[in-house]
Image: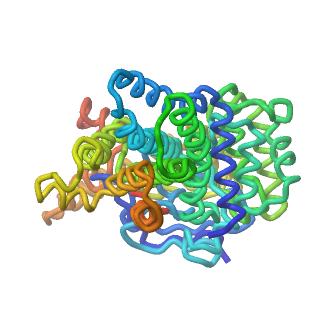
Amino acid sequence: MDAVHVRGLRVRRGTTEVFNGLDLDIPRGQITGLLGPSGCGKTTLMRSIVGVQKVDGGTVEVLGAPAGSRGLRHRVAYDTQAASVYADLTIRQNLRYFARLVDAPRTDVDRVIAQVGLADQRDQTIESLSGGQENRVSLAVAMLGAPELIVLDEPTVGLDPLLRSELWEVFRGLSDEGTTLVVSSHVMDEALRCDRLILLRAGRIIADTTPDNLLSETGTTDPDAAFLKLIERDAREEAESVAESVAEGEKGPEPAASTHPLTRREAREHAQHPHDEERS
Amino acid sequence: MNGVRTFATAGRVLRQLSHDPRSIALMLIAPSLLVGLFAWLFSEQEGVFDQFGGAILGLFPFIVMFLITSITTLRERRSGTLERLMTTPIGKADFIVGYALAFGLMATLQAIITVTFAVGVCGLDVEGPVWQLGLVAVVDAILGTALGLLASAFARTEFQAVQFMPILVFPQIILGGLFMPRDQMPDVLYAISNWLPLSYAIDTINAVTAGDEGWDVFRPLLIVTAFALGSLILASLTLRRRTP
């Protein structure tokens, strides 16, 4: 059975529609990478999975129960994008507090501190740490207890390559023990470390694949290039479908730009070169 | 509700405070300084401090706790920690009561120091037992905590949270009977003052300083307590697991 089962998810944040009928399945026991340009809906999807996002429609089922239901709060762990720990407490004080909330054994505190490589700083306050260290503390909180599903929103942002690689080994270790991980990232080389990849663009899934297939399908060796190729192909198809419906003489759908929210960068580029999409 | 998680939360809030000794000092000493200033101001006029000093004792803990609570909980909302907490098994009541316990404890310390200072150093004349004055100060501080928790639910920024003070707190001070006995107010204002918790806090203090006993002291005090509990319940109801 799938760890996450999303059907017809609709979410509106402010005046923009983030998802309009999203379907998605995430298998158990794997590391699923959630990739896409910023503003594409990664965080909203993760918030919907852990049950803190107000949704307007559709169903999100997690480990066989509705997302966010009481029974799931021991089984699902979430690390928000910004480090969500108490800046005025020490590393250990933070972890002890969260350990008590999720009924994790006390020994877990030192285990997770060691796993994220902060044993030497454990009695320092979060304020005195670097941004990368702070993110690692926040990540450690998500590893307390034995959650079946861990949802991590850009856990490796701002970390040097060595540390990133160490953390991915930790993720792999958790996955080998049977934990399901959903990890968002916009660092494409991390994509190759996942078992499965979901590429989001403007609230839609444009690819649901594996790292090997991603490279072979796009005929590239480098995930950055593969990703760009997919995004360009998606933009082209979108433009073509609009052109087709206009050619057929029927009242076509709204131009692509307004059927889904543009990312800020897309909107800016669109404003500067309004005809780029047709040209590409 | 779950005792372990409630007390873990209260402990965590106090531990956060312990990293900020300056705040603790301000919280514990500031009300005494203000009471001292007030006593000094009226030192030449016989009886004025005895008349107003008690009410002032109830006001300061209320205001200080209102501000501290609304800003700390707002910080929690904005830093993402609240969102994370809402994905853990902690109950909304655990969170709210945890905060109330932590700040209630600080309020008790504050009340002991302030009342001792007012009576011992400033010579506040109290007909009734002094501990009752302390009790009112504690209940007032908890009321401030409760209203602060509630107000933070409606504030999106620290700036808004601070703005809630003049709206929620000042009218209560003006209509509470400090400036004019409540029964001498215009009818409409008197009716409004009957719905404001601080009016009953000041009634209680006046009853204690006048040496009243029994129901005259405990009836208004119970009303203040009920307001505090009501705000705590409302605050935990306005806490949302899912946010837009």
Most foreground residue, A257 or A216: A257
Quadrant the C terminus of chain A occupies: top left
Asked if residue B184 is positioned above or below residue B225 in the image, the reply reads above
Report x, y in % for residue A165.
Answer: 77, 37
Asked if residue B24 is positioned above or below residue A215 in the image, the reply reads above
Report x, y in % for residue A233.
Answer: 43, 48
Image check: A139 left or right of A84? Answer: right
Report x, y in % for residue A258.
Answer: 25, 52
Picture residue at 40% right of the left edge, 64% below the top: B216
Asked if residue B225 is positioned above or below residue B106 in the image, the reply reads below
Residue B157 appearing in the image: no
Image check: B19 left or right of A47? Answer: right
Picture residue at 57% right of the left edge, 59% below the top: B97
Picture residue at 63% right of the left edge, 55% below the top: A78
Most foreground residue, B206 or B77: B206
Most foreground residue, B97 or A17: B97
What's the coloring here?
Answer: rainbow
Where residue B164 sits, quadrant-wise, is top left
Image check: A186 left or right of B66? Answer: right
Report x, y in % for residue B160.
Answer: 33, 40
Quadrant the N terminus of chain A occupies: bottom right
Picture residue at 78% right of the left edge, 41% below the top: A92
